[in-house]
Structures are given as structure tokens and as C-alpha cells.
Image (cartoon, coloured by chain):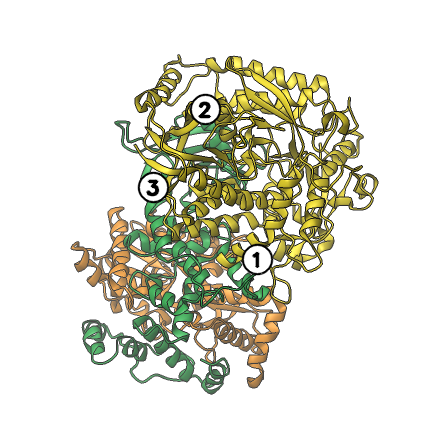
Chain colours: A green, B yellow, C orange
Amino acid sequence: MDATFKIRRFDPEDKQDPHYEDFNVELPEYGSVLEGLLDIREQQDGTLSLRCSCKSAICGSCSMKINGESRLACKAMVSEIKELEGDLITIEPMGNMPVIKDLVVDMDSFWHKVESVEPYLQPKGPEPEKEYLVSNDQMMTLAVAMNCIMCGACVSDCTVLEVDSNFLGPAALAKAFRFAADPRDGAQEKRLEMYDQPDGVWDCTRCFMCVQACPKDVAPMERIMDIRSMAVEKGISKGRGMKHIQGFINGVKHSGRLDEFGLARKTYGFPLWPFMLAPMGIRRLLRKRLPPIFHKSIAGAKNVKKIFENLGV
Amino acid sequence: MPQHQVLIIGGGLAGMRAAQKAQELGMDVAMVSKIFPTRSHSAAAQGGVQAAVSDDDSWEAHAYDTIKGSDYLGDQDAIEILCSEAPGDIYSLERMGVVFNRTPEGKIDARAFGGTSVKRTCYVADQTGQVLLHVMWEQLMKSQLKVYSEWFVTELIIEDNKVAGCVAIEIPTGKIEVFRAKAVILATGGIGQVYSPTTNGLVVTADGQALAYKAGATLMDMEMVQHHPTTMKANGVLLTEGARGEGAYLLNSKGERFMEKYAPNMKELASRDVVSRAETMEIREGRGVDGCVFLDLRHLGRDLIMTKLSQIYELARDYANTNILEAPVPIQPGHHYIMGGIKTDVDGRTWDQTGSNRWAGVEGLFAAGECANVSVHGGNRLGGNSLLDTIVFGRRAGEGSVGYAQSNEYIQFNEEQAKKRTEDRIKELFSRPAGGLRSANLRNEMGTAMNEGIAVFRNQDGMQKALDTVRVVREKYPNISLDNKGKIFNTDLLAALELEYMLDVAEVIGVGAVERKESRGAHAREDYPERNDAEYLKHTMVHKSDDGSPILGYMPVTMTKWEPQVRTY
Amino acid sequence: MRYAFWPGCVSKAGTPELYPAATAVAEKIGMELVELDQANCTGAGVLGERNEELVDTLNARNFAIAEQMGLDTILTICSTCQGVMSAVNYKLREKPEYLAKINQNLAAEGLEYKGTVRVTHMMWAIVEELSLEELGKMVVRPLTGLRIAPFYGCYILRPRYVLGMSEHPDRNQYLEKIIETLGAEPIDYEGKLKCCGFPIMTLNEENGLKMVSNHTLEAKDKGAHALVTPCPLCHLNLDEFQPKASSMSGKPINMPVLHLPQLIGAALGFNVKEMGLKRHIVSTDKFIEISGMS
């Protein structure tokens, strides 16, 4: 099987701007993009720079954009990509990180953000002599987040990081969840407060890019939602994020449908909400698209309310 | 010039353990790694780490299994330390945050593994290495270890047979820097890329062994190279022994569980050399398909596979196009590990600190992990003992280095000259005319020859042929030319430097292999099929002479309680 | 083609032009919509931040109601509703023990979800069940000369495995195909598969507005006359917040944003009032002019 790789090249020592170069590769039936890149670097053009090692999706070195989506090159099967997207495969370095050369990016800020969530156990009280006694279930809940191999694919595709480089990002926050949910850790409250701050969990826009990109099923966005859930449930989160969720809950719980007006009021609170909503409200009025101020319930609203109550919400 | 009391070269599990211990004991420590530490191949270890944590187990039983597994080539004093200190180290790792699978009582659970009499392999699903590595890295973030990440070491600086520092290239910039240190610990991992195929990652290129050998240290038992029984044909990647630990079968083309013939008791869980040989014989005798036999996990059921073996489910799906829930996956023996390595004592010292000069070493130079040979694995390593080796002896090397650094001074040397040696080497490589040979092709030539001649079954001609090929390839080395003469992230240059390391080490493997005229552990000779304790209960010791050629010698195995016995499973 | 119709909470409220446009177009193309007026909000991703079992129960309730009505397919007109429902349905069908647990939560109302419902979006139904060919035949006012930039919305794109993309791998190109069938030219730009920023508007308005301005300005740069989206929440953000996004970025945008039914309706011969094109915040006059609608 052969394919054409269109690779974004950039060498700071070169006088050229970043540009694309095409390479033809011949691969066995189950060949990966990484195998193709190695063939290029070993046999065709030794100036191609990329990071790689294990070839089995565990070291996390070879994350890059393949046809616009961030993934591990060693896990991207060329035959599958060709079938779905055609013979030309575009290969670019990860996004949201500065490029050092070709497919190699500077991951310093990535590592700093992971470090900033304090990713190490902070024991509560004296340590046991042997091991902490915990259930297998509790440990396996953490195992999902522990699957993370720090490849950077999630950060590379994150739509919030694209507009705001201060956001902690999916990798750091998935790691944060792993510690916030560890029964052996004594700093849960402090952690939830830390992750509740600006640039933390409430900055995620729920776009699923990280869930799609992650090669190890960590689903970072879901882990971020898990932290939000924990923070709200423990009463630690008191800001607008919590109020927005509560406003949503109020509407659906009592009427079965989203009450937009009520949601806006609860989110912004008094006396802010008239000022936040006024300019928009006037525009809407002019276009005859104000949401109803008096919100209608569905017939089965009582049943919906019971569902909420039975689940403790 | 950067200067640190203890300098650790290599950022995998052993290096991290050494760093942690040395820091704990108050040293100024730094780590130099040619890749970001979490990319180290320790992450690829799947099945688990052995420790006698269960009530119905004992470290003595673990030691016996290890000694038997080593085919009696392991040094029993070192093995006693490995096994007796194991439980303490495992508990300490758990307290640091490792998420082990648990028993119903909440204690660390253990699974069965090859060559072990009791279930004693502690595990985290089938990604134990990755979890251990990341937890250690997190601890080092906490203790703020100084890491020179993506720096490639080109030379150990030796003065008067003492280590003084090293020279390294900063890969992202091409800058060459000289480091001064009192103690240097090599923790650079195995030699995988010397073989083709291999389960090892692309960065596993025998750097530490070659650096130590060049510096004057001894490489011990290098012919003891392990082929793992279950590697995938497509890309050489490993499928954990834990699968067989959980009950998977090995089948030939007729669907027979052939291990019943070769190891009637332990069957699929015999030691790795026994299983690899069994598979090879089945394949040779026409009961394989396409050079493979089969690993069958269907009877284990979805729940078990998806919880405890999820990684290999994905690996088989992605790289062998096989759904292990529904079909057996084709596997074959593939290079995986080297029991041999830089000779050290039980505290990681590469030199004989008793002063008796029983072997050639370099003062101040330590080694730990796969690149070292204490020896705890002897002629064959049990699964789960390598992770343990890195954890126990990584820590001990860290401790050892502290003692040395505290009682020794920095050594003066000519910084400019040291730097110039590396600069000149690079200049020479860059100056070669275009259109020459490519490093990768020479590497493949060496790798294929080694895999044919010094693998599961060996004989004099085959081994000699491999050794000769290695020497021929070495002669072709000056004809390599590089495409890339830039400074920034020049992997073309690194590949050439790594090839040089591998050729040196491949030669040492060959030299030891042809001379050991017996079968022991992984060194299975068709021309000498029996184990010969009378003549060969000793370690192969190779160090470099002044003219560059290998000098072969031997040293007896240290025995404490266990007499060599016939080894059957 | 008969469907249980879930209009979503916003199509009659926050974006009230969508409901009449969608129902009119559905009738024209032969889709019979039986409205699920007893169904509840899907949670829109927000309720899941509080409690996942709650979201699974609420959506199972809707599925059970559809089953009770004898309908096996729910049709949505909102990417977000589609995404949430698809994810829940996937989970419930994959894990029968979990479905049993959820059904316990519904038992009090006498409801039980048997796992037979499939959830589709009008955009998918048009391509997969009506067919582009049939749609093409119904076009009376080809949108020639119009350049339209598609904007899908995250919840109808990711994660692929719950959205049926293994059977229909080109669901992430349907907007372009529909645009072409209607006679217009689809615009290719990077923002088409990205996020509009709606979920963070109350939490980090600046970032949300940057997303709005980035995508609309990029489409504008590439020569688009209008954006089209199958999600009213994306519409809310890209249209309603566009003036604010524009002033924050310091650049004029003036990019009209159409709901998918409005675009289709324009080509099928509906007029401006029927499609509610004057009810947007950002004026659609340019689109109306080029299309020749009255």
C-alpha cells in the first residue's frame, strides 16, 4: 500500500517560512503513520524531525495533527485514513504549542500546567505501615485518568486554549481529577478550591475535542465535569458556574423545560442581572424574540421533579 | 559548566528511583535524559512487579523462584536483597500514590506470572510500568528535581580511572555542554535496537552499556539476551505475560496447548526462555502459521479482559487486526530484554570497592536497572522482576552514590578538550560526502543478523556469523553520511551516534556468546544442549583493552543457600 | 417518514424563529412530525455537570414516551439535544444492567425504556432517509451565487462513536452536501468543526466572544455571505453575541447566521416571513437580497 504524506516543514535555521513538502511512502497492510514517517526520515530525508519511541501508544511521544486532528502517529493506521479521507495525508505538529522544528513542539507550558495542579498524593495524617487499604473499585475509578500518557493531543486540539493560553487545559485538569478523587489524598478541599479558580475547570467550553483526541480514553472533558460535580456537591464552588447549573436545575426540575429567563436571573444574580441582560433584552424585544417571562410547565412536570428528588438533586 | 554532586544519566524507573533517594539524602542531584523522562521505555512494561506481599508467600520462595529462573547464574546474595526488600519498596510506592489492583480486603492484589510458584506479581491492569513511572515522575516534580531533558550524552569523562563528569548535546539546540559530577549513575535501559525486531522502543540503543564499556567498566553476561514469548509479528510489540498469568493458552496451528509437552507443570507459565524455545520448536516443526503460534484469551471472558488486560485488547486490535475476545492472536518470540549489563555490586558500584580488583571498573561510576547486571537475573529473567530490579537497585544505587559523593572531591579535567572531542566527532560525521550509507540500513543489517544468530536457539556457526556481520557493519560505519547537518533536533546525527554504541555492545554480546560452551537460561545451544555447572557456573566478563578489542574473562557466581538443581517446569 | 419530534427548549423560546421554520420545511419535504410535547429538557450538557444518572434518567424518560407513542425514531433540530440523546442512548443500549437501574427511576411514572428508539437529527434524516437527490428535486429557488459557511456545533460531531459515524463516516460533511444541493457554494474554513463558545458565555465571556469573532471573521475572510448551523445554541451565540464579539475584536463582522431549516426553506420557495429571517439580531438582508427571497 502506498500513500502520500504532506508534511509541514519548519527549520528555524532555514531562511524559509513554514511550508509543506510531499513524500511518497510504501507501507505494509497495517502500517501506521509513524512507520511512514520513520521510512521518510531513515531512507528519504534525514532532516525530518519528530519525537517517537515505543510504537505502541504508551510513551506518548508521537502526538501530531493528522488530517487536522491530533492523535498518536503510531496509532493512526494509514489504510483506515486512506479509506475514509483519501490518499493524501496531511501531517502537522501539535497545535497550541510553539513549534521547535518540523513536527517537534515546545511542551514546556504543558508540563508547567500539569505541575501546577500539585499532582502528588498529600496524605491525610500518618501513613500506614504497609499499604493503604482501599477498594478495587475506588482504585479503578482513578485508573481511567491514570491511563493518561501525557501525549498532548487533547491540549493540541483544545478550542479554549486556542483563544486563551491561560486555561489550565484538559491534561492538567484530568490529572487534577485523579488526585481530587483519590481516597488516600488528604487535600481534597484545597484541591477543589484550587481547580475552581479562574483558568480552571469552569473555563472548559465542553466542545469534546479532548475526548475525541485522547488515544487512551481518558475523556478529559468528562473528568473536568467530574471535578465540577464534586466541587458543587461539596459546596466548594459558589461562583457563577455553580449558579448557572443551579439555575438550569431549577427550571427543569419544576417545569420539565429550560426556563431561560430564570436561568439568566439565577446565573447573574441580583442586582446584576438586569444590567447584564438589558442590552440584549432590548435587542430581542425589537426583533420580537423575548423568551416568555412566565414559563410554562409540561404536563408531567411533577414526575420530572420526583426524578430529581429521588436522585438527591 | 553545570556541576552536580550526583548526576544520573537516564530518566526511566531506575534513574528516577536513584534520583529520589539521593535527593532524600540531601544531595545536589540532576538527571540527564535524552528524552522527556516519562517517555522512557519503563512505561511499556505491562504485566506487573513481583513482591512477596501475600500472607502465603515469603521472600525466600521468591528468591528460590528467581534463582531457578536465572538457571543458577544469578548471584544469590543480590537476589536475597532483591526479594527481601521488595515488599517494603512496593508498599512505599503505593503510599506515594500507585494505584494497584486490590484484593477484596483492600490490600495489594497479586497475579500469577511465568516461573513463579505463588501469585506474587502486583499489577495495575496491564499498564503497571506506565503507572509506576508516572507516579515516580510526579514525586520528582514535588521534590523539584533538576532535569536536563532531551540531552544526549556522548562521553563519560574519566580521569585516572575515576569518573569526573560527562559531555552531552542539548538536542533542541545542538549546544554541547560539559557536566561535572562526583558520582555518575547510568540508568539508560536495555539494548533492544541491537535486535530487529524488538519490543523495545526506538530510544533503547545501549547508550549506557557502550559509555561504560568505553570508559573501562565491565559488561557481564551480555550473551544472556531474552526473547519474550508473546510479541506481535506486525511491529514486534509486546503482549504481556500477564495474559498467561490470567489463564490464556498458547496454541499451535492444530489448536493444541503445546506447552503441556514442554513444561507439564507450569505449562504456559514456565520461564520465558523455556516458552520461547517451545514456540520456536513448534514453528520449526511445521505447527506454526507464518512464523507464529497463537495466544488464546477467548475463554477469559469480556469482563476480565476489559478490566485487567484492556491495553493488550487495544494493541491486538490496532496492530494485529485481531479481536482477542473472538479470535486467538498470532505471536512469536521477539527480543525483549537483556539480563546482561554493566557489572555492579549490590549498591550499584561498577568498580570493586573491596580493592581486590576482581573485575575492571570505574570509580565513581554507578549503574542500575536494565543497563546494569548485579546479577539478579542470571541466565533468564522472570517476568515482573525487572520492574522490581529498577525499584530496589535504583534506590540502592542512589544511596551508594551519596556515600561516594560525600567522601570524594570533584575531579579537575580539561573542559575545552572534552567538549572538543564531541565537536570533532560531529564535525567528522558532517564532513562526509553525500550519498553514503544510511544508519538505519546498517542498523537493520546488524539487527537481523543478531536475531538470526544469537536468539532463541544458537550454535557456533550461527553466532560466529552474527559476530562477523557486526564487525563488517562496523567497518562500513565510516561510509555513513548524514542528510541533516543542522543544530536543531538533529535525529539523523543521534541515530549515527547511537549506532556506534550499538555496534560496540553487539560485539561484546557475540564475543561472550561464542565462548560459553553450554546451554544455560536464554543461551540455548544446539551444539552444547546441556548445562555445564562444572565449567560454567560463572559470569562472562568483558572489558575493553587499550587497543579497543574486547578482553574476555570469568568470575564465579556467588552462592548462599541454594545449590544448582535440574531445571524443569 | 414519521418521527417523534423533539424541538428542544430553545427553538420556541431563545430562537423562536426556528420552530415555525423547521416545522414548515419538514412538512414540505414529507416528514411527519409527531411532537413530544410531554418530553422534558435533555439537560443540554449542563445537567450532566451535576449528576450523570439524572441526565440518563431524563433522556430515558423521553425515549420511553416515544416508545409509548409507538414511534421508533426521535428527530431533533438541535445539535446539542442530538449529542446528549445519542450519548445517553448509546450508554443505555451498551449496558443492560444500567438501563435496568435507570428504568427503576422511571417506574413511579409507569414508564420503561425498552431500548428500541433511535435518535436522528433533521440534517441526517434529510441526507440518509430523504436523500439529497429528492431534496434537489424540490428546490424551486436555487441559491446560486450564495457562498455559505457551514458551522456544525460540537455536539453533532464528537465523540464520533456515539454519533453513528462508523456507519455514516461523512456525517461531518452533510452541511456542505446540503448547501451544494440547494445550489449554493459551501465555504471551507477551519472554524467549521470548532466550538461557538456558547457553554462558557456566562463563565468566561471574553473567551466565548473570541470564538465567535474568530469563526465569523474567518468565514468572512473566505468570502462567505452567511453561516448556516443545525444548532440553535450555536445560532444564539454566533448571532446574538455577534455585535458584542465584533466590538471586542475591534472589527466589523455583520455575518448573518441561518438555521439549517431556514436555508433549506429559502431554496424550497418559502418567503422571508415564513422563515422568520427578520427576527435575527444580525441582519440577514444581504442573504435575502442575493437569494431573491421576498
The reply to whether the C-beta atoms of the residues labelled 2 and 3 are less than 8 Å apart is no
Mark 2 secondary-structure assignment? loop
Of circles 1 and 2, which is in front? 2
**Numbered badge on residue B100:** 1
Q: Against A297, is B487 above or below?
A: above
Observer-nearest of B494 and B160:
B160
Q: Is residue B294 left or right of residue B156?
A: right
Q: Against A227, is B506 above or below?
A: above
The amino acid on which the numbered mark 2 sits, given as a three-letter code, is Asn
Q: Position of residue C92 (x, y in %)?
A: 57, 68
Which of the 4 image quarters holds residue C20?
A: bottom left
Q: Against C22, is B285 above or below?
A: above
Residue at mark 2:
B161
Residue at coordinates 33% horizontally, 20% vertically from top-left?
B417
* Quarter of the figure with the C terminus of chain C: bottom left
Residue under disc 1 on the same chain as residue under disc 3: no
Residue under disc 2 on the same chain as residue under disc 3: no
Q: Is residue B285 left or right of residue A202?
A: right
Label 1 crowd bin: few (<14), some (14–19), many (20+), radius 10 Å: many
Query: How many callouts does the rendering have?
Result: 3
Q: Is residue B199 left or right of residue B269?
A: left
Residue at mark 3:
A106
The amino acid on which the numbered mark 3 sits, given as a three-letter code, is Asp
Q: Position of residue B254 (x, y in %)?
A: 81, 40
The reply to whether the C-beta atoms of the residues labelled 1 and 3 are less than 8 Å apart is no
Q: Chain of mark 1?
A: B
The amino acid on which the numbered mark 1 sits, given as a three-letter code, is Phe
Q: Chain of mark 2?
A: B
Q: Is residue C23 visible?
A: no
